[in-house]
Amino acid sequence: MDFSLTDEQRLIQDTVRAFVDERVLPVAVENDIAHKLDLSLIEGMAELGLLGIVIPEEYGGAGLDFVSEALSCEEIERGEAAFRTLISVHVGLNSLSLLRYASEEQKQRWLTPQARGEKLACFGLTEPAAGSDVASMRTSARREGDVYVLNGQKNWISYATVADHALVFAKTDPGAKHKGISAFVLEKGMKGFTSRDTEHKLGIWAGSTGELFFENVEVPAENLIGEEGQGFEIAMYSLDQGRFTVAAGACGVIRVCLERSVEYARERETFGQPIGKYQFVQDMIAEMVLGYETSKLLVMQAAWLKDEGVRNTRETSLAKWHATESAFKAAHLAIQVHGAYGYSAEYGIERYFRNARAPIIYEGTTQIHKLMQAEHALGLRKLNGRDGAISPIAAWGPALLAREPGPPVAAG
């Protein structure tokens, strides 16, 4: 088992780390307090190839592997969660879905400029009454000749007001539940397609979050991605990609909280000695170490499976659940280590605490991921969907591979 990084992976890690140190962190607290989306930093990310990091070079991307993407997301979120969120929605949820499901013409039209960073993209799935229960969405798409007419709305959409392209999901067959969902690409400026920023959020103040509105939007039929009724499959594939970047980014939160806490605990003195010599402080530091290394191992397991071309819904879910919960805990502990300074915006620790809360909710709540893990283990859900593949580390998996999922067993 080889844990070493290639020269190329170390180079991208070092490059993104330097970008964060030199350009993101110096203005991070200021941008957060001002609720400012710093587009110049997004331009810098595009110049580094991060907006197409795992997209093949033939479509304008950097053509790197998923380990490189994980390392990049960790470094970016160490600086500011808003920009890792951009990688999640622009690359993970949108571009990788186009890479898999779009036609060649559609890839040239939308994917290539996205991978080059010339156009920004978002992902429109969540609605006011449809979060975890995707099949309950109300946005509709009615076929009329050569167009689909979309009506409805989406909320909690990252980069809703600044994106040039939106991958939007709507019901083309309202009576078919999840089998009646289809996916479309909408472009900014389409008549009846509008957006609005969401204000007064708990965290990610330096990011963009908003709503999408569709009022009789005529979307050309050639903007349909995949087939009619394939939208749920596309959305679930998208979430596998987005959740991976969320988990990788969470590692960056844990790491920065650990690094900052260690530095502070070495320098801050009470009763004549550094606070790092007190066992209660050491206990908090140790918890962060455990959270970081277990989260990083789960992320790298998922990255390896992705690079091997193996479906990894279960492993990515596990990484997302554990890493996001560990990040929030690390940020909480970091505030405790820093005391009143951790509570102050001046030190920036409270920013990580606020920003770490949303990932526990979006792209599958912790409760959804716990449900998925339990159903996989109990044989109530096929291991990683149709193919039954599972990480070789999971020694319990083979015992369930031959078993078909059955109905839940009633308690009695």
Image: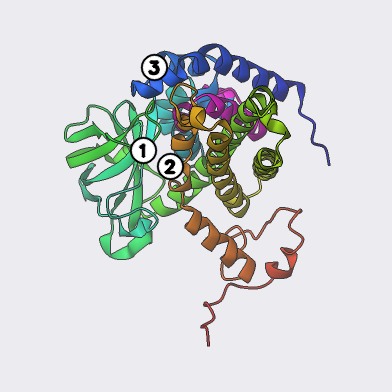
Q: Amino acid at mark 3?
A: Leu
Whole-percent x and y of residue 124?
A: 34, 41
Res 114 → quadrant: top left
59, above or below 314, in the image: above
Q: CA distance from mark 1 to mark 3?
A: 21 Å
Callout 1 secondary element: loop
Q: Nearer the viewer, residue 242 or 179?
A: 242
Res 119 → quadrant: top left
Q: Which mark is residue 186?
A: none
Residue drawn at x 35%, y 30% is: 159
The label nearer to you, 3 versus 2, is 2
122 lies left or right of 266: left
Q: CA distance from mark 3 to mark 2?
A: 22 Å
Res. 98 in view? no
- Residue reaching furthest to the right: 1
- Are the residues at dot 1 and dot 2 in contact (C-beta closer than 8 Å)? yes
Residue under label 1, please give it.
202
Q: Amino acid at mark 1?
A: Leu
Q: Earlier in the sequence, mark 1 or mark 3?
A: 3
Q: Which mark is residue 39?
A: 3
The label nearer to you, 1 versus 2, is 1
Residue drawn at x 49%, y 30% is: 340
Q: Which mark is residue 358?
A: 2
